[in-house]
């Protein structure tokens, strides 16, 4: 689980530091997500984002082998070479969805080759945090974990994380790692924001119990939590949904609901009270959630990144956090969730404020 670090260096004054998991790296509580690099953001603009992020005290840079078909890693590697290396930063990348022909993403052959390719593109001797980008039902889990352990023994990766898994899959990962003496993951990277809190039902409670930190992606719900989308106006222009209203999990017709706009109303009210943009409030709420170690900030332009980094000093009072948690709470769910609290005696869901648990009937 994340631990606040108080001895922040003087040259990084604005960004709080946290430890990922049990014994993982110390990282800035805002991380730079680089999915746009080499796709929507060219190398020159990406360099400017990287420069700004480090100037503002950021230390965790997150990428993946599939971002820009490898271009994101290459851009980070070239930027690192220009500045004399990346040793002062924490570099996270992922493997799983760009396997060599003839093997599945979680297979030993795929992992070893994918990690080596990432090392070359990044220009580093070791990857600080290597995420498996998702579950592979075709490959025995022990094969995946054994390959990751071999990379650790070889000094090519330092820590392991996983992304986009269910609670039962994560428990399988933890149990298998512990049974065979393999490295346990220190972090999980899920989608998590005011509009998407599904992980709070089982995934997040497991992370809290097992000591994993979260590095959430899509903290602004694909732009919805910036307040730029309206119920009655379909998006147009140079925005994520303006380019493609059906894009991904934040698709306009999927997210344009009464619940979304109720959340946006409260978010906007709190933002006005603090004289901040809604995005700052949404990021501050997420950074304060139990288990969150580092929030991934992704941007097309350096100006967008600067706007989001300005949220680093916003600490919302408890009453604002509670208001946002209540309005965005998950709806009441059927069995077994409606009786879990009574039977278990645990207060995890109350701490998370999911709103999913109601008193069980006699």
Image (tube, helix red, strand yellow):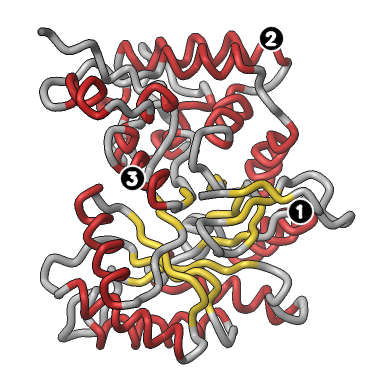
Kindly tell me whether residue 296 is visible in this rendering: yes
Q: Is residue 8 above or below residue 69?
A: above
Q: Is residue 270 above or below residue 242?
A: above
Q: CA distance from mark 2 to mark 3?
A: 35 Å
Secondary structure beneath label 2: helix
Q: Nearer the viewer, residue 93 or 8?
A: 8
Secondary structure beneath label 1: loop
Kindly tell me whether residue 298 is visible in this rendering: no
| Residue visible at 25% across and 85% down in the picture | 108
Question: Looking at the figure, which quarter contains the C terminus?
Answer: top left
**Residue 167: percent from left, percent from top:** 25, 48
Q: Is residue 132 above or below residue 169?
A: below
Q: Nearer the viewer, residue 35 or 160?
A: 160
- Position of 32 with respect to 179 (left or right) is right
Disc sitting over residue 155 in the figure: none
Q: Earlier in the sequence, mark 2 or mark 3?
A: 3
| Residue visible at 40% across and 73% down in the picture | 183
The answer to the question of whether label 1 and label 3 lie on touching residues, with beta carbons closer than 8 A, is no
Q: Residue furthest bottom?
A: 154
Pointer 1 residue: 57
Secondary structure beneath label 3: helix
Q: Earlier in the sequence, mark 2 or mark 1?
A: 1
- Position of 285 with respect to 108 (left or right) is right
Pointer 3 residue: 206
Disc sitting over residue 273 in the figure: 2
| Residue visible at 20% across and 25% down in the picture | 343
Q: CA distance from mark 2 to mark 1?
A: 27 Å
Q: CA distance from mark 1 to mark 3?
A: 31 Å
């Amino acid at each position: 689980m994340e631990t606040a670090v108080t001895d922040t260096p003087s040259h990084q004054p604005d960004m709080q530091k946290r430890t990922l998991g049990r014994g993982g790296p110390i990282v800035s509580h805002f991380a730079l997500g680089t999915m746009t690099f080499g796709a929507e953001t060219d190398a020159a603009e990406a360099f400017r984002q990287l420069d700004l992020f480090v100037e503002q005290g950021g230390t965790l840079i997150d990428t993946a082998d599939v971002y820009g078909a490898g271009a994101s890693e290459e851009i980070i590697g070239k930027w690192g070479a220009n500045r004399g290396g990346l040793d002062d930063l924490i570099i996270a990348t992922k493997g799983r969805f760009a396997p060599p022909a003839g093997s599945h993403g979680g297979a030993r052959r795929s992992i070893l080759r994918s990690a080596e390719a990432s090392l070359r593109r990044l220009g580093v001797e070791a990857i600080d945090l290597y995420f498996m980008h998702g579950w592979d039902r075709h490959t025995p889990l022990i094969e995946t974990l054994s390959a990751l352990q071999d990379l650790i023994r070889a000094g090519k990766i330092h820590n392991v994380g996983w992304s986009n898994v269910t609670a039962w899959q994560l428990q399988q990962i933890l149990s298998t790692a512990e049974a065979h003496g393999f490295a346990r993951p220190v972090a999980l990277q899920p989608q998590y924001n005011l509009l998407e809190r599904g992980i709070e039902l089982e995934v997040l409670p497991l992370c809290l119990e097992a000591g994993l930190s979260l590095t959430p992606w899509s903290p602004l719900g694909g732009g919805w939590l910036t307040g730029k989308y309206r119920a009655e106006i379909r998006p147009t222009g140079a925005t994520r949904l303006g380019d493609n209203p059906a894009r991904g999990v934040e698709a306009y017709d999927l997210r344009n609901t009464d619940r979304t706009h109720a959340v946006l109303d409260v978010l906007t009210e709190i933002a006005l009270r603090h004289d901040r943009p809604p995005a700052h409030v949404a990021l501050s709420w997420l950074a304060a959630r139990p288990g969150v170690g580092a929030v991934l900030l992704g941007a097309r332009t350096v100006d967008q990144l600067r706007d989001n980094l300005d949220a680093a000093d916003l600490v919302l009072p408890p009453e604002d956090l509670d208001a946002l948690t209540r309005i965005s709470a998950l709806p009441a769910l059927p069995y077994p969730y409606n009786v879990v609290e009574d039977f278990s005696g645990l207060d995890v869901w109350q701490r998370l404020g999911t709103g999913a648990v109601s008193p069980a009937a006699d």
